[in-house]
Amino acid sequence: MMIAGPGADIKPGSVVVLKKGHPCGENKWEIVRFGVDCKIKCLGCGRIVLIDRLELKKAVKKILEVPVHEGTDAENH
């Protein structure tokens, strides 16, 4: 498990811990979509929530997992 600070890149598939927990008791979320509006999924109950990117960046306590994509363009050239 890789632990990164709030300044690290947030990408789809990342697992983040938010400052405020979800009512189900979980505070770990998976990033489903990351753009102007972000879609996050609660890892406790599966609820999907839309949140503004700036609000999400303020709410992130830490980033637990960042997906590693193999076969990037840098490796192929």
Image (cartoon, rainbow, N blue to C red):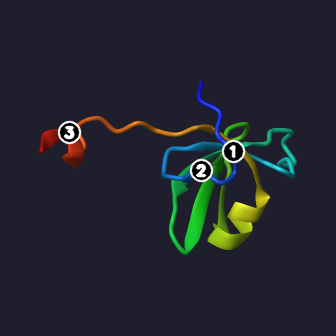
In the rendered image, which quarter contains the N terminus?
A: top right
Q: Residue at x 84, y 51 (%)?
A: 19
Most distant residue in the top direction? 1
Taking 32 as reference, is 68 left or right? left
Place residue 59 in its image quadrant.
Answer: bottom right
Q: Residue at x 69, y 45 (%)?
A: 5
| Label of residue 23 in the image | none
Place residue 28 in its image quadrant.
Answer: top right
Q: Secondary structure at mark 1?
A: loop
Q: Is residue 74 visible?
A: yes
Q: CA distance from mark 1 to mark 3?
A: 26 Å
Earlier residue among tags 3 and 2: 2
- Residues at marks 3 and 2 touching, judged by CB atoms closer than 8 Å: no
Residue to which mark 3 is pinned: 75
Tell me residue 47's x, y (percent): 68, 50
Crowding at mark 3 (Cα within 10 Å: few <14, some 14-19, many 20+): few
| Label of residue 8 in the image | 2
Earlier residue among tags 1 and 3: 1
The disc labelled 3 sits on which kind of residue?
A: Glu
Q: Residue at x 76, y 63 (%)?
A: 58
Q: Residue at x 50, y 52 (%)?
A: 11
Q: Secondary structure at mark 3?
A: helix
Q: In front here: 48 or 76?
A: 76
Q: In front here: 26 or 36?
A: 36
Taking 20 as reference, is 64 left or right? left
- Residues at marks 1 and 2 touching, judged by CB atoms closer than 8 Å: yes
The disc labelled 1 sits on which kind of residue?
A: Gly
| Label of residue 5 in the image | 1
- Residues at marks 1 and 3 touching, judged by CB atoms closer than 8 Å: no
Q: CA distance from mark 3 to mark 2?
A: 22 Å
Tell me residue 32's x, y (percent): 52, 53
Tell me residue 53's x, y (percent): 63, 69
